[in-house]
Amino acid sequence: MSLIATTLPTLEALPDDAASADVDVLVVGVGMRDGAPDVAAPALPNEVCSALTAAAVAVGHTGAAGTVARMPSPAAIGAASVVLVGLGDVAGPGTDEAPAAAEVLRRAAGSALRSLDSVQRVGIAFPVTDLASVEAVAVGALLGAYRHTAHRTPRSTTTTERTIAVAGGDDARPALDRAATLARAVAATRDLVNAPPSHLYPASFADAMIVQAGERADRSVDVDIIDDDELRQRGFGGLIGVGSGSVRGPRLVRVSYAPAGASRHLALVGKGITFDSGGISIKPAANMEKMKSDMAGAAAAAQALFAIAELALPVRVTAWLALAENMPSGSALRPSDVVSIYGGKTVEVINTDAEGRLVLADALVAAQEEKPDLLLDLATLTGAQVTALGYRTSGVMGVPSARDAVVRAADAMGEPMWAMPIPEEVLAAYESGTADLKNVGKPAAGMLGAAAFLREFVEEGVSWAHLDIAGPAYNSDSAYGYTPLGGTGVPVRTLVEVARVLADDSEVTA
């Protein structure tokens, strides 16, 4: 069974006359103007918008962002039913109109599609103003339509391809194509994060990368795999140590995209713990099943690279996937063991559940041998990230210019991130009397301390940032907007935007 199996709907352009569109359901945005609902759909005649506004009032739809109501269509609309989805405030200062923000459009489209599982043809007549807003609607709709059903018994033996038609005019095709590429990458990341550890482990993860690269052979994408024997021979002590408790050995996978003429190089290092039991320092049983998601950083790094290749961005990208399964056994890493990270620096293991930083350290050192212009690592690294920033906002630390470039890209793509410091004093807690470092410090400021630990494996002058995505990578609360339960696909879209900016030769230096 393929680890990446989700098929997203096909995107089309909605006709200029949305009322006559060949769709089963038409999705229309409802804004709030002076506290009252107001339908904003330039693709619909004014009288139809007025009728829909009256219907919204009748059913108590306020236009608040994300609210959804489905009703029979007025006679002027060919679709059998209409979904009214809230966009929030639509009136700008004074009498000027403010277009809906891209993230508002993404979430509204996603909320609508989450409510339309059984509908084959959906039209979305939102108030889009440019290709960027068309792309936002399309991305939100596709991600809202995502369902992970790979391990469920099919209800029927026949499937019908779904279609989403998005308002935007005849020139919308490039925006729709880009949206489809981004959404496929996010969906593939979600598929990997949602995959059970019985199916996803270091070797099968690596094999999946070979398959995906083969599908993009014409895009200058290659995969190199370092297996456990070679890792041991070459001194990758973090990966070997963390993976020593499992019968399924670790892997270091290097995925590369090298287009001709690229002058800038982005390196992505992803934590790929395919299941994290905590090792000898075993985790509590409650909620341990969520630890299948501890490879979200590696999944996002790989899928972002594949999206960058499909978009043909003129920037070289290398993704380093540090893959291991952290299990307890007679051969497992023990508290007080010392491991030698690739490059020679030694770490005393105090807690085997602080394993992600060990495999990342190996991969960070390897990635720097290629002298990238920008080095980013991404990991579901610390519970302290959730304590500090919650389940929807990632923490970003590192060299200020690199850190801030990531945050700007995240803002543009609607993936909340917050710049955090690495105070000099937190590293003192990682001093060891036995080795160069120990792998845990004090409980306070744990996210910042983990970043300080990783910084010890980054050479002076390297433009580097660390993304802690522990909470945002996996949603175990309730679905919202275009975000389902389970894997979210964070931060694929941010990484693609970082690559786009880097390809434009913008300044991202140490």
Image (cartoon, rainbow, N blue to C red):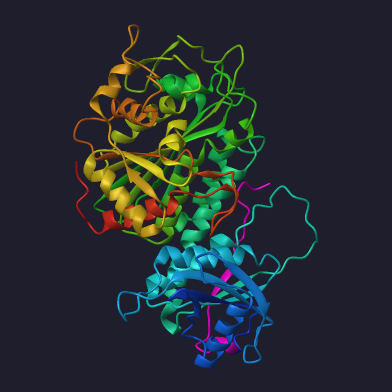
Main structural element of the magenta stretch: helix, strand or loop? loop
Q: Position of residue 380 (x, y in %)?
A: 47, 36
Report if residue 17 lies within the magenta region.
Answer: yes
Residue 417 position within the rendered picture, expressed as x and y whole percent measured from the top left: 37, 47
- Horizontal side of 220 relative to 504 (left or right) equals right
Which residue is at 50% across, 60% downward?
183
Q: Which region shows up in magenta?
A: 1-19
Q: Position of residue 379 (x, y in %)?
A: 44, 37
Image quadrant where residue 10 sits: bottom right
- Comparing 217 with 405, the one in front is 405
* Viewer-nearest residue: 171 or 109: 109
In this rendering, is residue 119 above or below 410?
Answer: below
Residue at the (28%, 47%) spot, across then down? 265
Q: Quadrant of the C terminus?
A: top left
Q: Does 491 appear in magenta?
A: no
In front of the other: 209 or 272: 272
Who's the residue at 63% across and 35% down the image? 197
Image coords of residue 64 (percent x, y): 51, 67
Residue 35, compared with residue 212, is above or below; it is: below
Left/right of residue 77 with respect to residue 304 in the rendered view: right
Tell me if I can see residue 382 in this picture.
no
